[in-house]
Image: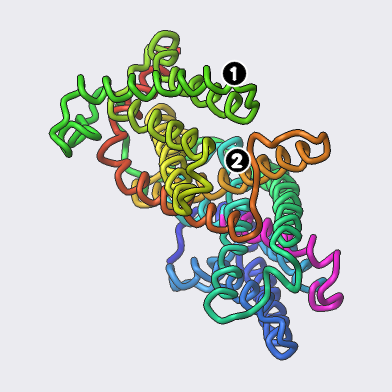
Amino acid sequence: MADARFNEGFDEPKRNAALAWLVIAVLAVLAVNHGLADSYRWLAFTAFAIAIVLLPVAAFRDPLAMPPWELLVLLLLPVADATVLGESFLTSIATYLAVAAVALVACVEIDRFTAVRMNRAFAVALVVLTTLAVAGTWNVSQWLVDVTFGTNYMLDGRSQDAANRALMIDFAYAAIAGLLAGIVFSRYFQSYGVNEVDTQRTSAPQKSSPDSESDPVPTLIRDQLNAPDELVILLSRVMQVALAVILCYGIFARDLTTVANTAIALGITFLPAILERDAKLPLEPGLVFWLTAAVFLHVLGSAGLYALIGPWDSLTHTISASIVAAAGYAVVRAIDLHTDEIYVPPAMLFAFILVFVLAFGVVWELMEFGIDWSAQRLGLEAVLAQHGLNDTIVDLVYDAVGAAVAAIWGSFYLTDLSQRIARRLEGS
């Protein structure tokens, strides 16, 4: 039987389920129509959307465990639009309205059918991030199909640069659609009052205070490589000095790209010291080394290794994504420990972090494209540049790899940091 919370939001759950099943039936018919019309992308997408909607039904073995039928209508509209108009400009927009609708339905199901607790701000952010993550995953999936089966979904007869430009426009549509879906979810929260802490939820275990949590199992580097903290700190300082030397070289050579990349990277390496001084949040030397190594490797790439060593870009993206994932893990866990309004079970934290990093990867590619495009228009050398569709997609793939690494190791190596952040939140 589905969670009792399912019935709290509706006066007539059977009526809601009946209307929801009707929408699902229409979606199934449209999916078959797309298959007969050889529109395999929309067939796959519609089938995926139906699977997301029916997941609680399968999990609870209850046909009433359906999300609000109004949300399913939002999902139906862009799929129907694609059926009527076929491949068109409006259908390109409809694709990401559909992506946002799937993200919206998924977040509603997470709230209603799992132990996850969310306040309104967290929920809206999750909808926006999920939309961007689904958009990134959808395009990576199409690219993988093209590479594996020789199809032409992504290039579609265009050059690498033209296809990449079209992808960035699609990502911009996804960001706008995600914001609209976030607004809809905010209204949903307001309508059903689920932004308040539900004291009736007993499925989530009681959380202890951050101070009572056990210490993390090993440290990041010392217990794995038998490297003393002093050596780790020394290596971080050596990389900082090397960055300073590269910065001076860039200034002397009047190389704007080197100066900009190195100055930003060097500034980032001082972030842990600033956090320790201003926020009283000391970071383990291994984490500082991790952060410093990521920006140092990026600067080396910008200085020429990206062109000389093909996989260097993938290496830096993986490490950078792991840092973003680590930051997301630590902050979400800290908020989880700090407030009763938000609860993320450890089993679901991996998925949350993966969504966070994939969304960040999409935002980063949009920013990179914006900088590159602006530099070209102004006749300047781009500080950050894109090199075609394959470069963008591979970056997103390695973002996912870095996210997976950080999410898996996070429960061991980032617990202590999360506890310190939570204590700082309690003291503020």
Given the image, on which type of amino acid does mark 2 rest? Answer: Ala
**Residue drawn at 60 percent across, 35 percent down:** 121
In the image: residue 15, left or right of residue 338 = right
> Which quadrant does the N terminus fall into?
bottom left
Residue 192 in sight from this viewpoint: no
Q: Position of residue 222 (x, y in %)?
A: 18, 31
Q: Residue at x 61, y 42 (%)?
A: 364
In the image, which is nearer the foreground, mark 1 or mark 2? 1
Instruction: Tell me the tag on residue 125.
Output: 2
Residue found at the very far left of the displayed protein: 226
Amino acid type for the residue under numbered disc 1: Ile
Residue 392 position (above or below residue 284):
below
Q: Which residues are magenta?
A: 82-106
Distance between the alpha carbons at the discs numbered 1 and 2: 40 Å
Q: Is residue 327 left or right of residue 46?
A: left
Label 1 vs 2, first from the N-terminus: 2
Q: Nearer the viewer, residue 171 or 304?
A: 304
270 up-or-down from 157: above or below: above
**Residue 251: numbered disc:** 1
Q: Are marks 1 and 2 in contact (CB under 8 Å)?
A: no
- What x and y, as percent, mark residue 380? 76, 33
Observer-nearest of 401 and 335:
401
Rendering coords of residue 138 (x, y %) = 60, 64
Q: Residue furthest top?
A: 277
- How does the figure colour the protein chain or chains? rainbow
Residue lying at the far bottom of the rendered structure: 36
Quadrant in the picture for residue 290: top left
Residue 116 can be seen in this image: yes
Looking at the image, is 110 positioned above or below residue 411?
A: below
